[in-house]
Image: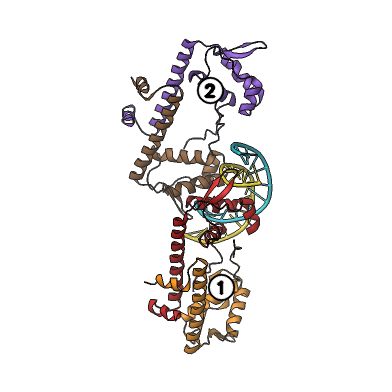
Chain colours: A orange, B red, C brown, D purple, E cyan, F yellow
Amino acid sequence: MDKLLNGNVPIYVQIMDAVKHSIVSGELKPGDKIMSVREMASHFGVNPNTIQRALLELEREGLLAAERAQGRYVAADENAIENLRKVMAEDAVKRFKDEMQALGYGPDEIEKFWR
Amino acid sequence: MDKLLNGNVPIYVQIMDAVKHSIVSGELKPGDKIMSVREMASHFGVNPNTIQRALLELEREGLLAAERAQGRYVAADENAIENLRKVMAEDAVKRFKDEMQALGYGPDEIEKFWR
Amino acid sequence: MDKLLNGNVPIYVQIMDAVKHSIVSGELKPGDKIMSVREMASHFGVNPNTIQRALLELEREGLLAAERAQGRYVAADENAIENLRKVMAEDAVKRFKDEMQALGYGPDEIEKFWR
Amino acid sequence: MDKLLNGNVPIYVQIMDAVKHSIVSGELKPGDKIMSVREMASHFGVNPNTIQRALLELEREGLLAAERAQGRYVAADENAIENLRKVMAEDAVKRFKDEMQALGYGPDEIEKFWR
DNA sequence: GTGGTCTAGACCACG
DNA sequence: GTGGTCTAGACCACG
């Protein structure tokens, strides 16, 4: 019997994920200004420092950029976004396969669920 | 931008899921005695009442049964377990498809990730 | 000589029964809002958790439904209520027959008490 | 919504009832010796004083009698027992009718449950 | 306000 | 020992 996960994914990582989803889904396009730290903090109901950390991390990944006194915008170009989408999809696929395997379904049997 | 999930899956549901996984994976077989309420409580680090609730729910689903002073055991037969496995797999498939769609992949494009 | 019953019907079952009686007697009609958990707890002089358990059980039976922040209401329609009334009556009949049999009255002899 | 009964039938009355049932069912016949106070106390898991009170009450009703150093026996004759049976049955009938009425069944409708 | 979840801990029946 | 019930009380999400 496994241990519980009890939601131990850090909030700032969840924030990063939400922003990434907004980007790959096209809701946010290259160059678009994103919400201010304060706005996001109240939107998600978390501390502004937590938002700060998530956005800094996303800057390091090259997805966002900040311009002093102008706010943050999407820095990734179409190419980078397409890449991100692929990586996130592969992640989802991996998690899915693991889940199916835990249920006792081998790679071949998964096909059955597609027809 | 979606709201955060912030781990709002109730602990008792997570416990139910852990037990179900133990059953469909074959770790627990029909008739097997499961851990006592107190054991599970200390194993998962939660209150015995939370375990109680999860196990009662699983009894209602017909997966477990209790015998006073003897403990609980797996009440589902092979058939019921096979059924549960299928339902859980279909659930996983649905969640996966939703996730892929959120990333902008249509049903057809998902196929690409299998070759 | 039988053992004593010593009132071992759990309180939450007694609560369920009280609510069911209110419903089949027409005191509570389909769609009617019922007392809040806290109100019932103080009305019956028991812990809110005990009420909670009784009401959850009744939800599972489809008699009640809850709307977050709005309270609970009677979810059963006239048909379901009529059905419940029948089931409860058959239960009462069965208990009565058992009691009469314990007193040494066969099914035929019970008729005498009706004229 | 009614108040709960919460098992408020006094234990000594429940004991009386158990003895009466043993008598009308024929398990105990006129003249039969019954269990000692101590035996009954341990059988029912209650205080001997509670048994004492129940048996004294039954003596007052003429059902039992005690003989110093010999124990108690059934003092009622066949006639008295037959009478007791009738009274208890009428009680059961009354309680049953009340229950059915609470469920919304009139005296006539009760007949339906007999065919 | 409402219901939903959870903890901490007690006491019971049963074998 | 085991599961079953109950209390007291906290904290949460939701509107």
Viewer-closest of F10 and C75: C75
User: Residue A14 has which mark?
Assistant: 1
Residue type at mark 2? Asp
Residue A87 visible here: yes
The mark lying in front, picked from 2 and 1, is: 2
Total marks placed: 2
Badge 2 marks a residue whose secondary structure is: helix
- The chain that hosts pointer 1 is A
Q: At 57% from the left edge and 43% from the top edge, which residue is drawn? A: B68
Judging by the rendered image, the residue that carries numbered circle 2 is D17
Q: Residue at x 43, y 37 (%)?
A: C21
> For the N terminus of chain C, which image quadrant?
top right
* Residue E7 in which image quadrant: bottom right
Q: How many angstroms separate mark 2 from mark 1 (CA)?
A: 66 Å
Depth check: B77 or D30 in front? B77
The amino acid type, in three-letter code, at marker 1 is Gln
The structure residue drawn at horizontal position 55% and vertical position 51%, both measured from the top left corner, is: B73
Q: Residues within 10 Å of mark 2 (few under 14, many from 20)?
A: some
Residue B87 disc label: none
